[in-house]
Image (tube, rainbow, N blue to C red):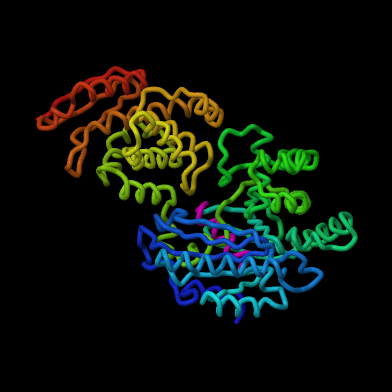
């Protein structure tokens, strides 16, 4: 059975557990995934919206299973002891959470080590955990599918670097194309005899061969893995970038080269503290950067993006039927949040229809942000009233929402701030404004004021008790209310309607119908 057939079998029923219980289920049954890598062993428990899973629990132990394997061909003894202890803990946690059996996947170190099978047997004896050891092409596919979970319909090249290997995968039209695996993991490269020159020669030769097999790949380069996230943190620090969210963070080739130079010239300990990077990760980062430099020369991508989604998320995506994959991860996450936390679940959709006339000129990408804002407008109501605006902003900019550029996160954050207060002043917010144009800031302001007014018209009915009519050319904003719902248009609602008119630079008119 080839690797693709093995993967297909796993996708249908991994180790006796189906991660996605129902084919089109909107919410995800809580599931646990264990990723046994060459450098770390991690447990992730997913929960939330099926198409945009949240991280209910996330724990990582830096074991270094692949350290020294080039010389010994065996797993690092200390790393093996630490990994078994970590897996005992993870299994106990899973039993306490009621999410057994866990789905456990092992990558390069375990698949290549002479004692890899013995390690898997030991883990099974001591913990009951069954480990699925995947080959390089399976690993490449799962990592690419993880990227597709966060970026539906993306085109480009996925590069996933671990401790002992580096995988490349082509993605297009929601599918995974060509895949290759190599030995360009920094733990393995660390042990090459002959020092830096020999290492760089090996990197160059290997990447040239990878390019011949992968062909021209000049779309976006998606970087997956802890080394790339660490590099992104340093890049953010160098640029004084205001939003420290790794997922969907964009970099340029020139910027990466400048950040690598900063890494080479800086004190590692100070950089670890400043950028919140572990010493173990920092020790391997310069070698990973040698790989990245050569990769950028070979493939010359048009731009570069960090993906926090990889192999673990790919396990979920692998089991999603097309109908679930085709859903928008942002909107799905917002629907789930509204159902779970809003006072009136379902009102967000009505609110979206109510304010839609104001945003007819928006393109599809902007309209989905309008819809997301409407769905999220009430999920933070439990917060202290003095801090609701700030919490709304933080939820939009920092929470687990897939399919969002950083600028879109900030746009959503500023719009939701207006739900609870009239202005968005504040030093931390002013810094974020640099990610938006003046026009986008004005659009976010209008959206926020529209939601702030529309939220006053709550009813138990399935329809809004009124309608907005926006005549752009004559700058006239009309509110049509039916007789029975006029009492909802009290003093506060009137003031908010007037504020919306001011934001639109429009005259306002109220029309009462029978």
Q: Quadrant of residue 207?
A: bottom right
Chief secondary structure of the magenta span?
Answer: helix
- Give the percent coordinates (x, y) of residue 340: 32, 50
Q: Is residue 302 left or right of residue 35?
A: right
Residue at position x 56%, y 80% in the image: 125
Q: Is residue 25 left or right of residue 461?
A: right
Residue at position x 66%, y 69% in the image: 80
Quadrant where the N terminus sits is bottom right
Residue 402 shows in this picture: yes
* Above or below 166: residue 258: above
* Above or below 390: residue 210: below
Residue 292 shows in this picture: no
Residue at position x 56%, y 68% in the image: 87
Residue stretch rendered in magenta on the structure: 139-152
* Above or below 268: residue 357: above
Residue 234 in magenta? no
Q: Residue furthest bottom?
A: 1
Decide which of 435, 67 is in the foreground and name it: 67
Q: Quadrant of residue 160?
A: bottom right
Q: Quadrant of residue 357?
A: top left
């Amino acid at each position: 059975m080839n690797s693709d057939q093995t993967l297909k079998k796993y996708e249908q029923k991994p180790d006796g557990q189906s991660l996605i219980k129902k084919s089109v289920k909107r919410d995800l049954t809580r599931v646990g995934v264990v990723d046994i890598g060459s450098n770390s062993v991690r447990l992730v428990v997913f929960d939330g919206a099926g198409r945009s899973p949240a991280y209910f629990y996330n724990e990582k132990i830096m074991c270094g299973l692949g350290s020294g394997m080039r010389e010994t061909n065996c797993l690092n003894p200390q790393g093996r002891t630490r990994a078994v202890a970590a897996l005992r803990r993870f299994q106990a946690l899973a039993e306490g959470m009621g999410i057994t059996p866990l789905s456990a996947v092992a990558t390069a170190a375990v698949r290549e080590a002479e004692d890899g099978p013995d390690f898997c047997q030991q883990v099974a004896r001591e913990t009951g955990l069954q480990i699925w050891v995947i080959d390089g092409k399976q690993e490449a596919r799962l990592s690419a599918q993880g990227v597709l979970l966060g970026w539906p319909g993306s085109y480009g090249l996925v590069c996933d670097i671990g401790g002992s290997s580096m995988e490349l995968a082509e993605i297009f039209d929601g599918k995974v194309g060509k895949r290759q695996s190599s030995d360009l993991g920094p733990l393995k490269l660390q042990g090459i005899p002959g020092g830096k020159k020999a290492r760089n020669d090996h990197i160059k030769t290997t990447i040239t061969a990878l390019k011949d097999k992968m062909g021209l790949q000049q779309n976006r380069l998606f970087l997956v893995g802890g080394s790339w996230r660490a590099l992104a943190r340093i890049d953010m620090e160098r640029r004084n970038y205001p939003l420290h969210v790794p997922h969907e963070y964009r970099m340029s080739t020139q910027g990466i080269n400048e950040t690598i130079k900063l890494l080479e010239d800086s004190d590692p300990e100070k950089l670890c503290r400043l950028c919140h990077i572990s010493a173990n990760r920092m020790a391997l980062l310069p070698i990973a950067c040698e790989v990245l430099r050569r990769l950028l020369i070979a493939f010359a991508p048009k731009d570069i993006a960090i993906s926090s989604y990889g192999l673990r998320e790919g396990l979920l995506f692998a089991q999603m039927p097309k109908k679930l994959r085709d859903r928008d991860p942002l909107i799905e996450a917002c629907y789930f949040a509204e159902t779970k936390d809003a006072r009136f679940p379902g009102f967000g959709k009505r609110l979206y229809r109510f304010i839609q006339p104001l945003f007819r000129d928006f393109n599809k990408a902007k309209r989905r942000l309008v819809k997301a804002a409407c769905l999220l407008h009430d999920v933070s109501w439990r917060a202290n009233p003095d801090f609701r605006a700030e919490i709304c902003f933080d939820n939009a900019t920092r929470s687990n929402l897939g399919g969002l550029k950083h600028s879109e996160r900030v746009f959503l954050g500023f719009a939701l701030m207006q739900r609870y207060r009239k202005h968005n002043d504040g030093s931390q917010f002013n810094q974020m404004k640099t990610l938006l144009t003046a026009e986008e800031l004005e659009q976010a302001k209008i959206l926020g004021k529209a939601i702030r007014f529309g939220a006053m018209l709550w009813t138990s009915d399935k329809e809004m008790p009124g309608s907005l009519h926006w005549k752009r050319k004559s700058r006239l904003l009309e509110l049509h209310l039916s007789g029975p719902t006029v009492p909802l248009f009290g003093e506060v609602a009137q003031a908010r309607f007037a504020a919306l008119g001011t934001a639109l630079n429009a005259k306002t008119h109220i029309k009462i119908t029978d």
